[in-house]
Image: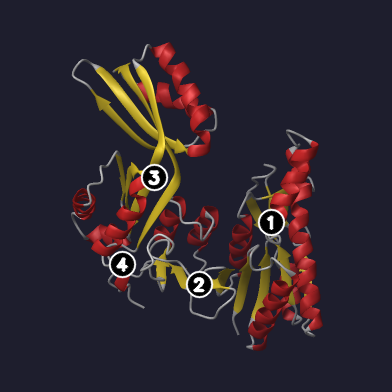
């Protein structure tokens, strides 16, 4: 007998019919002898509807009340799924995050889980019930409802799997696994049978939308095996787990990209110690996340600093940078939103040299100019013009033999 945590996203429970389909899938897993805990999101579109209602009432809704409002979406789903299971004569019981005591800090709308009391869930499982838990939510020490941020149901599922010492946390979604790249850009992309936590964390942070970054971090920290599966068709999915030294790793496991990028440059800043901090600290204090950074020193003793930010924060960041430039006496501020970030990811880089050179050569052969470069132990990222996205991804996918990923 295995203890499994299933998580179903908004698309998987988007209609009454789909909730009934999930109920049949969960019932079948229980019939195999497994103990099942189910974590669900709000029905597709429901969270956006609730956000819209709040916006119609207030330009700046109080975060505490937003949490009270948004948590109702998952409460609807858990009740409906429990009803659907009872219709199949399968014992089930639904719980909100507060009822199973998913204790969080007090950071409303972006809370972090601190502890989980799994005793009640274990009691239900031992009694033969399926336990259904509302994802995305918890409760603070003060008894206030809290939410974990967009995509937080993934984190709920992984945290419950860790607390219960589950055999596997299975994330059911509208894709049948993690692919070498987005199949909509490269039709020859292949589903990966397995990927390491490190690789998945890089893929998630670089634009892959299959899993929430915090969920992958949590799974890696507590060594919870994750599997991405399709709600709508059977298959083995993709297992996300620890790196196995005994298995020869491919050099590159996947290619991620992010269209949500913008580039800013401050030119002609006097070169002196602390200049990067003087430029970037005010940007960070405005809660604008800076990604890639390049600093160039000119022969005249001045420096240029280039960095990227999320595209929705571009105008605000540019305004701040212009103020900084005026204060420092910089020559000018330049900006661009016609860029994308493309990254190759793979733990195999640790034991293979010249991956960067190969990547740059492939892009050069396609006439693609690189604006910025960033590297880590298992990742190389470049910024290029957005018009080259599909060409670059397809060329790199072919060059690193990802079309023939082994099963």
What is the C-alpha distance between the residues marked 1 and 4? 34 Å
Q: How many marks?
A: 4
Mark 1 element type: loop
Residue count near mark 2 (Cα–Cα under 10 Å), binned few <14, some 14–19, many ≥20: many
Residue 385 appears left or right of 356 = right
User: Dot 1 corresponds to which residue?
Assistant: 45
Q: Residue at x 73, y 69 (%)?
A: 132
- Provide residue 22's location: percent of width, then percent of height: 68, 75
Q: Which residue is mark 3?
A: 340
Q: Badge 4: how crowded within 10 Å, few (<14), some, or many (20+)? A: many
The residue under label 4 is: 402
Q: How is the image coloured?
A: secondary structure
Q: Residue at x 59, y 76 (%)?
A: 232
Nearest to the eye among marks 4 and 3: give it: 3
Answer whether labels 2 and 4 touch (C-beta < 8 Å): no
Q: Nearer the viewer, mark 1 or mark 4?
A: 1
Q: Are marks 2 and 1 in contact (CB under 8 Å)?
A: no
């Amino acid at each position: 007998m295995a203890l499994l945590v299933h998580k179903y996203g908004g698309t998987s429970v988007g209609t009454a019919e789909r909730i009934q389909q999930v109920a049949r899938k969960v019932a079948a897993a229980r019939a195999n002898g497994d103990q099942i805990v189910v974590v669900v999101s709000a029905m597709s579109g429901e969270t956006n509807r609730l956000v819209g209602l709040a916006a119609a009432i207030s330009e700046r809704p109080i975060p505490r009340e937003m949490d009270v409002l948004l948590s109702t979406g998952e409460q609807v789903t858990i009740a409906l799924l429990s009803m659907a299971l009872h219709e199949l004569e399968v014992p089930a019981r639904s719980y909100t995050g507060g009822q199973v005591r998913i204790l969080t800090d007090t950071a409303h709308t972006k809370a972090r889980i601190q502890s989980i009391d799994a005793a009640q869930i274990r009691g239900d499982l031992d009694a033969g019930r399926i336990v259904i838990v509302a994802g995305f939510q918890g409760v603070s020490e003060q008894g206030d409802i809290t939410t974990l941020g967009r995509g937080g149901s993934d984190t709920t599922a992984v945290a419950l799997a860790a607390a219960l010492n589950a055999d596997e946390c299975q994330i059911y979604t509208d894709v049948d696994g993690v692919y070498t790249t987005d199949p909509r850009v490269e039709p020859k992309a292949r589903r990966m049978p397995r990927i390491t936590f490190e690789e998945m964390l890089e893929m998630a942070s670089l634009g892959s939308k299959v899993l929430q970054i915090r969920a992958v971090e949590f799974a890696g920290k507590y060594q919870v095996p994750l599997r991405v599966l399709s709600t709508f068709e059977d298959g083995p999915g993709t297992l996300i787990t620890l790196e196995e030294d005994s298995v020869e790793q491919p050099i590159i496991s996947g290619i991620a990209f992010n269209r949500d990028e913008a580039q800013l440059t401050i030119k002609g800043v006097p070169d002196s110690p602390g200049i990067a901090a003087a430029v970037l600290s005010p940007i960070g204090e405005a809660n604008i996340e800076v990604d890639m950074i390049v600093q160039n020193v000119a022969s005249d003793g001045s420096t240029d600093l280039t960095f990227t930010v999320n595209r929705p924060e571009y105008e605000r960041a540019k305004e701040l940078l212009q103020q900084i430039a005026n204060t420092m006496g910089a020559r000018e501020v330049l900006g661009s939103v016609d860029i994308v970030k493309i990254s190759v990811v793979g733990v195999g880089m640790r034991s293979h040299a010249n991956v960067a050179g190969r990547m740059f050569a492939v892009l050069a052969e396609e006439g693609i100019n690189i604006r910025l470069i960033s590297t880590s132990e298992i990742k190389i990222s470049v910024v290029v013009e957005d018009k080259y996205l599909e060409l670059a991804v397809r060329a790199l996918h072919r060059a690193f033999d990802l079309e023939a990923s082994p099963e």
